Image (spheres, rainbow, N blue to C red):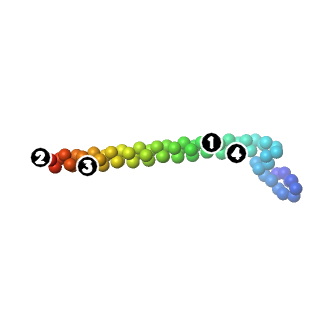
């Protein structure tokens, strides 16, 4: 721990040293941001795809019921 101006700072919060802890935490933060971005993008893609498939299936059922009622 280092003391500056009467405050106690943990080594991973001390940006002036460029410690290994700071680099590791920054790398983990970047990886986590990337992972969250990919997961959200995938969830959005799957949600839109599922909505479109369900909508088309409902239209198909309506058309099928309409043609089945005809003589």
Badge 3 or badge 1: first in the primary sequence: 1
Task: Please name the residue that numbered disc 3 is placed on.
Answer: 62
Element marked by disc 3: helix
Per the model, the C-alpha gap separating discs 4 and 1 is: 10 Å
Front residue of this view, candidates 1 and 38? 38
Q: Residue at x 82, y 43 (%)?
A: 17
Residue 22 spot, x, y in % from top left: 74, 44
Element marked by disc 1: helix
Q: Residues within 10 Å of mark 2 (few under 14, many from 20)?
A: few
Task: Please name the residue that numbered disc 2 is placed on.
Answer: 71
Drawn side of residue 71 relative to residue 57, left or right: left
Q: Residue at x 46, y 43 (%)?
A: 45
Residue 68 spot, x, y in % from top left: 17, 47
Badge 2 or badge 4: first in the primary sequence: 4
Q: Residues within 10 Å of mark 4 (few under 14, many from 20)?
A: few
Task: Please name the residue that numbered disc 1 is placed on.
Answer: 31
In the rendering, which numbered label is found on residue 25? 4
Per the model, the C-alpha gap separating discs 2 and 1 is: 62 Å
Front: mark 3 or 1: 3
């Amino acid at each position: 721990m280092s003391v500056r101006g009467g405050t106690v700072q943990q080594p991973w919060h001390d940006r002036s040293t460029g410690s290994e802890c700071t680099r590791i935490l920054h790398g983990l933060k970047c990886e986590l941001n990337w992972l969250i971005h990919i997961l959200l993008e995938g969830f959005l893609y799957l949600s839109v795809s599922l909505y479109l498939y369900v909508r088309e299936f409902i239209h198909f059922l309506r058309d099928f019921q309409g043609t089945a009622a005809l003589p």
